[in-house]
Image: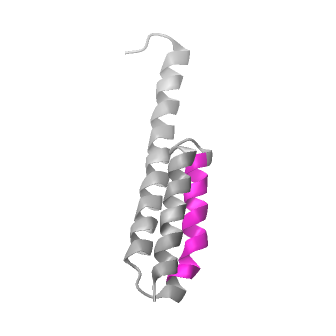
Amino acid sequence: MANHKSAIKRIRQNHVRRLRNKYYHKSARTAIKELRAETDKTVAVGKLPTVFSQIDKLAKRNIIHKNKASNLKSKLNKHVNALA
């Protein structure tokens, strides 16, 4: 256990940030799964900007790497364009 006040505060901050990052990451993954499961192109095109926004926010907060974000967006765009 930490002995200094600053170390105790750091542990508390890390815990809160970890939970917040986990929430953002999980909600984005769920949105991605819902988009991939979508079969109607018009609905998928409507969901695409919100999912892209979530992915960009993850990259901005360093929860995922910027290249991973780019790859995800590219694959999702290809998937939506391939829908009939």
Give the extent of the magenta segment. 44-59
Between 1 and 38, the residue placed more toward the observer is 38
Using the image, determine if residue 82 lies above or below residue 69: below
- x and y percentages locating residue 8 in the rendered image: 48, 20
- Residue at position x 44%, y 66% from top? 32
Name the dominant secondary structure of the magenta segment. Answer: helix
| Above-or-below relation of 15 to 77 | above
Return the x and y of residue 49 as percentages of the image width and height.
61, 71
Residue 63 left/right relative to 30:
right
Give residue 35's quadrant in the image. Answer: bottom left
Q: Residue at left 49%, top 68%? A: 76
Name the residue rendered at 58%, 69% in the picture: 50
Quadrant for the N terminus, please: top left
Instruction: Establish if 40 lies above or below 52.
Output: below
Q: Foreground: 39 or 25?
A: 39
Residue 4: x and y in percent read: 50, 11
- Compared with residue 38, is residue 14 higher up or lower down, i.e. above or below? above
At 53% across and 70% down in the image, what residue appears? 77
- Per the image, is 54 magenta? yes
